[in-house]
Image: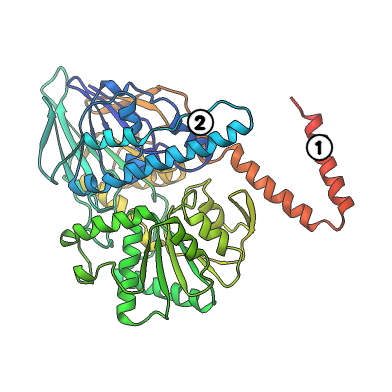
Amino acid sequence: MAFLTFCGAAGTVTGSCSYVETSHANFLVDCGLFQGNKTTRLLNEGEFPFDPSEARFLILTHAHIDHSGLLPKLVKAGFQGPIYGTQPTVDLLQFMLPDSAYIQESTADRTNRDRKRRGLPAVEPVYSLEDAQQALSQLQAIDYEQWFAPVDGIDFRLWNAGHLLGSSSAEIKFQDAGSDNTMRMLFSGDLGPEEKAFHPEPDAPEGFDYIICESTYGDRERDDYTLEQRRAALQKELVEGLARGGNIVIPSFAVERSQELLHDIGVLLEQGVLPDAHIYLDSPLARKATEVFIRHAGAMEDVELAQEDLFRHERFHIVQSVDESKDVNRVRRGAIIISASGMCNAGRIKHHLKNNIWRDDCTVLFVGYQSPGTLGHIISNGAEQVRIHGRHCMVRAAIRSIGNYSAHADQSELLQWIKERLPVVGGLFLNHGDDDARSVLSALIEELGVDPAKIHAPQFDERFELVAGSAQSKGRVADRVSAEQLNTDWNQDYAAFMLQLAKRLDDSSSDQNRSELLSQLANVLTANGE
């Protein structure tokens, strides 16, 4: 008997964290940062729904911040065990965690300046650079497909997941207490698509008691494509975007997505099929990640440029300092600007959007998933106005997207991966996906012959007892957030209302009409005051 609690990425796609309790030891799989709307992000500031000091070790499937970003907080809260991941994962985290700590500290500083003006007490950052450095000291690199015993009675090995440099699925086995049975579990981590630059297709054995599988694109099917076709689609968007006369702004995740884009643009430049343009990678984190990719280039697949030329074309400009970034904002035409964050919630991308999104000769090109509640989701869903750094910006730029740069397997690829892992004796859990994606994928898994009673869509903080042949829900161990709040909250509604109000005021025919509108709103507030 064992217990499994889903402490994140249940009904959402961020904050991945699973807590496993066995008779041998308690351990964690991933401990990621929550991203998305403000209510979801506030989860980063609260307590964990378990005692971190009782976890003996942690298995990290990959370096993406929604899987690794709360490791420093975990250490700060008392976790002292080793953190196991592949060597590329360890290498990427050497700068990803300090970068995340810098964001936490600078966000707290900015918040506290505002709170001081309002007479409110100061807040602490979620974690500090010192906490990040301590987490790094607990990292241990593990090779793929090699059994490892972190404690007596528990063994695990990592399999390529095809999602990110160093990404893995975790196969875990341990003796079931009170019996001679060995329980076998498989955590998919995030799975990559079949057509993915740099990595082979995901792999793992078959036949498990329990499988925990991501479901990000469980309700979506991409058109079949090859890497050449994807590159051709990018070429088309870049050529048409530059022909409009302005710049192209590409929000992109700093780790892997940016490197894939640089690789493909480099190939297009070598082929001579792009007009004269300069490419700016404006993300210090992406710059450091690029160095790690170069270091591991010999182990990557589908790389069409020589290692000495990878990410080094003469038209590439790797932007580092704030002043250099400001210089990019002065470029009015002929620039392809790749910048983080990929969902436009923070970082230098917001400055580039503020300077280009209101211009009808510019283009914003999305190349990845946009979580509900993020600025990227609002823009890509057709908003006419957005708020950036507290200012209203009209959306006049062409808003375009390419779906084939996703690092996640789509519906058919998820189904194929699950089919190849069957049979599953005890249960199949679908996490890391919203409820619609999980519902659609569940129905399709039934068609594979899996008993619907064994397919679970765990809720936030839900705990399951794992016994021979079945999983029994024990309810939620905490009440941190409701399912509704994961995808919407009042902060999002407030931002939308302010945009509507600004438009109504701008469209009013006279100052008298504007005053009457504001008076009506004031009366409503007075009448409904608490």
Name the quadrant of the C terminus: top right
Outermost residue toward the top? Answer: 178
Tell me which corner region of the image, top left, top right, bottom left or bottom right, holds residue 30. Answer: top left
- Looking at the rendered structure, the secondary structure element under dot 2 is loop
Residue 41 visible in the picture = yes
Q: Residue at x 54, y 73 (%)?
A: 246
In space, the residues marked 2 and 1 are separated at their CA atoms by 31 Å
Q: In the rendered image, which residue does mark 2 sit on?
A: 482
**Nearer to us in this view, 524 or 192:** 524
Q: Residue at x 49, y 61 (%)?
A: 326
- Looking at the rendered structure, the secondary structure element under dot 1 is helix
Tell me which corner region of the image, top left, top right, bottom left or bottom right, holds residue 48. Answer: top left
**Nearer to us in this view, 47 or 12:** 47
> CB of mark 2 within 8 Å of CB of mark 1?
no
> As drawn, is 129 to the left or to the right of 418?
right
- Residue 368 versus residue 117 in the image, above or below: below
**Nearer to us in this view, 514 or 450:** 514
Q: Label 2 is placed on what type of residue?
A: Ser
Name the quadrant of the N terminus: top left
- The picture places residue 218, in percent across and down from the top left corner, at 39, 49
Indicate which label's residue lies in the foreground, 2 or 1.
Answer: 1
> As drawn, is 213 to the left or to the right of 508?
left
